[in-house]
Amino acid sequence: MFKPASGEPGNFLLQLEDVSRTYQMGLMEVKALSHVTLNVVRGEFIVILGPSGSGKTTLLNLIGGIDSPSSGKITVDGIEITALDEKGLTFYRRHHIGFVFQFFNLIPTLTAKENVEFAAELVEKRRDVLEVLELVGLQERASHYPSELSGGEQQRVAIARAMVKDPPILLCDELTGELDFETGKHILAAMRRINEVNHKTVLLVTHNTAIGDIAHRVIRIRSGEIVEVRENPSPADPQELRW
Amino acid sequence: MNKLQRKVVRDLAASKGLFLAVIMVIFLGVALFGASFIAYQNLRSSYDYTYERLRFADFTVKVVEAPTETVEELESIPGIEAVTGRMNVDIALGLPGEETRGVLARVISLPSDSRPAVNDVKVEEGSYFQEGEGNVLLVEKSFAEHHELKPEDTVFLTVDDQEISFRIAGIITSPEYIWPAKSRQEILASPETFGVVFVPQDTVSGLVGKPFINEFCFLIDEGADRDSIIAEVVGTLAPYEVMDVVTQEEQPSNAALEMDLEQFGEMARVFPLLFLIVGALATYILLSRIVHNQRAQIGLMRAVGYSRRQVLVHYQIFALVIGIIGAISGAIAGYFLSEALTNFYIGLLGLPFTRIETQWLAMGEGVLIGLLPCIIAGILPAYSASRLRPAEAMRTPPPATGRKILLERLFPFFTRLSSLWKIPLRNIFRNRRRSLYTVIGVTFGVSLILVSGGMIDSIYALLDVHFDKIQTYDAQVTFAQPQSTALVSEVKGWEGVEESEPILQVPTRLEHEDRVYSTLVIGLSPDSELYGLYSTGGDQVTVSEEGILLSEGLRKTLDIHVGETINVRSLPAVSQLEVVGFVKQTMGSFGYVTLHQAQSIAGDQDVISGILLNVEPQHADTIREKAYQIPATASVELTSETRKELDEMLDYAVSMLWIMLGFGAALALAIVFTTVTVNILERRREIATMRTLGESKTRIAAMATIENLLLGLAGLIPGIILGYALALYFFSLLQTDVFSFDLVIFSRTYVLTAGLVILIMLISQLPGIRQVNRLNLSQVIKEQVT
């Protein structure tokens, strides 16, 4: 089993320092995240657990640079992303982050291969599109449109799209939320493989407690606060999961 | 092609119906602009070229009688480039094969041995006069075509009861008679009763008994001050009694063409503008819908690393594609349409010279004015797409605001309505901006249809007023020379004549302070039943010995009011008459007096210039033949025939208006189709949910229909107001001393317009309804709410 780097400050890929995020909903102020501090080392597979509305997706969005904290500091790969302007954030997302969403978010008018190319075209240093499709087991379905693919296949296209830019961090939001049990396990296995073989740092948000067993570290969030951080010395094989 | 570009292509293909509808609006707008504006430019340059080639006079001065040597004297006035002195007289003309009928010919003299220095003619068939030829003449083309006259045919001029035969040497076109108007007062002269012929100068002198000049045509040097030259010319010609000064702008044919061209030009500007505003609205609606529907995709693009600028450009490209395809195809179609339109017009007018150029600039302008509204309309949705925060874009948006509408709060009755009514009503107020655009689209569609329909109605109403209220006689006999009033009672005794009244038309110059206007003063019986006069308020009035009635148009031309005195100058005398009222007039501007007053203006002679008749229809032809046997008869005009000819003459104008009406209907269809389809498709998830809950397809279609019909009805009223205002504006361009149109829109036109727009709404919602009826319910329900 692949082991992430040791938890020394020099190995930190991602650092969150006292990060908070509040939203204004009409007259109400909603505290989505409150004083979160977290360090992630390169190559770690982290599962963030929490019930609906706990703030886990907000945390992922802040790390991914598609949302900005109300306070606190986030540093990724030595870049303080909270200090970046719009242009800087775009560049950051382009080169450092790969997103995988619960609803896949594929462009319906592009084929599986074209959806992957859609992201690949943004970077010069990119992986071969067919190779990443092969990595997720979809090379045979490359010319199919999203509407012709099953949920699991669509999610694999989304993973390939995140992988093709070869980013150091993959952010997955409710990766298996829209999938059946068996397909979900296959997808998780694919993510684990990517973490182990390609040494990508994976942050996976879910409300499914069982998925926590495959992570190096499990972080629990409730009402916008980290309530538990649990190390997992021997992560389980995704195929052994039951929920 | 990169993937972003491919996405554009595929998105366009996915909503091709809607894109095509918006492209169609831009296409129609640019095509309409191109067709009318290029045709306008072509006509303008053809007129200018014709006038230049044939040396069309800058101004003409009419006198009673001047010696031929006056020309040399006038030529010496500084600033004058050339002068032609000629004779211009009206003489009865007999045509081959139509011996029982005659027409009034305008006989104009031309030099027999050379071409005139001013107001030349273009020989279309046959030849110009050969030196030494006497009884030959040239016939104006439209008149020759109407009577199928050819070179070498023989026609007759009747002078002093003597018929003199003339050989037609050639068929010509003249810059003065491109629009063959008899005078400014009789702009729609029928070739059945009026024609123009050109005769060698010496021959005309022979016909009238002596050589003289009664008309001088002038060309002035470029940059010369026309007004001061006119003043000097009028001073020089004062001994010969100046009757009228007609500038190029006032010349009847040119004035008619100019008025027509100006209105054409104005329509070339205003109508396409309406299309392009609607095109911009439609583009905005469509792009807003795309941006709204692709929120998640936009969020993804931004999350993956696409910059704001890339997102903005991506969505702006949709607007550009609409603009480029619509504008370029519209410009090309406009170019070909303009050729067809120019050729149609030129053929109709029989222009001597045409100058058709490829109007690259106008085509470029067309592309630009098609492209600009799309780009501007696209900026807002594209900008809002680029400003979407990725996390927000991908988050499920809160449900659209739903609340009681004002109507429900004010009238509790509405809250008890069934969902069949309540949902459409709330939908209208839920997306007010969308509803407003639908209403604006309907408003513009209705107004375009109504403007065209109103103009068609007004043309027919003008003819109705002219022939049913003003000229109520069945026939008019016109004499070449004044005749005794005794003829009126003689004619009344003819079989089939129900009524006969005298008429005396005296050529005069009306003078009020420094303003003058040359026209006919018409003398009628005070109790005339065959010539109706109506005050500007619409009441019937009669001529009286107390003064003169003037056509409404003269109020402004002469700057005169009721109670003021006017000088009426005729050949033999100057009379002073008090203006006792103004009367409505459809064509021309005249003064109306009693027969007795007219005779006094004409020099106290007991004469008439014509007889008005009411006849039994079965005797009309016999009476006409009999009238032509009166030696002095120049023409006999049957009102029914004149009306038929006028109908034919106006047919082309009406057919153009029908085309405009078709454009209006197409516009209404395109805008309504876009907004209605967007309205329906945007709520596909909501509709799918209703279907899942058990609502029938019919009820859902009924809800869509109710919503669209309510919006359609809301657009009808402002559409009618805007259409009426636009029609009034176009009519204001037509209010001259030559024509006086009242805007008339028949009730049936309102009903038909409303019916047509409602029908368009019902048809245009069908594709949208069909699409939602075919929804895969399980798939749509699962879709992310965006």
Image (cartoon, coloured by chain):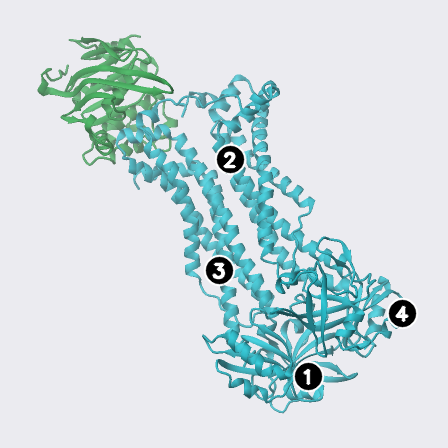
Chain colours: A green, B cyan
Q: Residue at x 52, y 65 (%)?
A: B43
Q: Which residue is disc 1 drawn over?
A: B167
From what the image shows, is residue B673 above or below residue B259? above
Q: Amino acid at mark 1?
A: Arg
CA–CA distance in space, label 3 to label 1: 42 Å
Q: Which residue is disc 3 drawn over?
A: B38
CA–CA distance in space, label 2 to label 3: 34 Å
For marks 2 and 3, the one nearer the N-term is 3
Q: Position of residue B729 (x, y in %)?
A: 57, 52
Q: Which residue is disc 2 drawn over?
A: B436
Q: Regarding mark 4 in the picture, which secondary structure is present there?
A: loop
Q: Position of residue B726 (x, y in %)?
A: 57, 49
Q: Which residue is disc 4 drawn over?
A: B494
Q: Position of residue B155 (x, y in %)?
A: 72, 80
State yes or no: discs 2 and 1 in contact (Cβ < 8 Å): no
Q: Regarding mark 3 in the picture, which secondary structure is present there?
A: helix
State yes or no: discs 1 and 4 in contact (Cβ < 8 Å): no
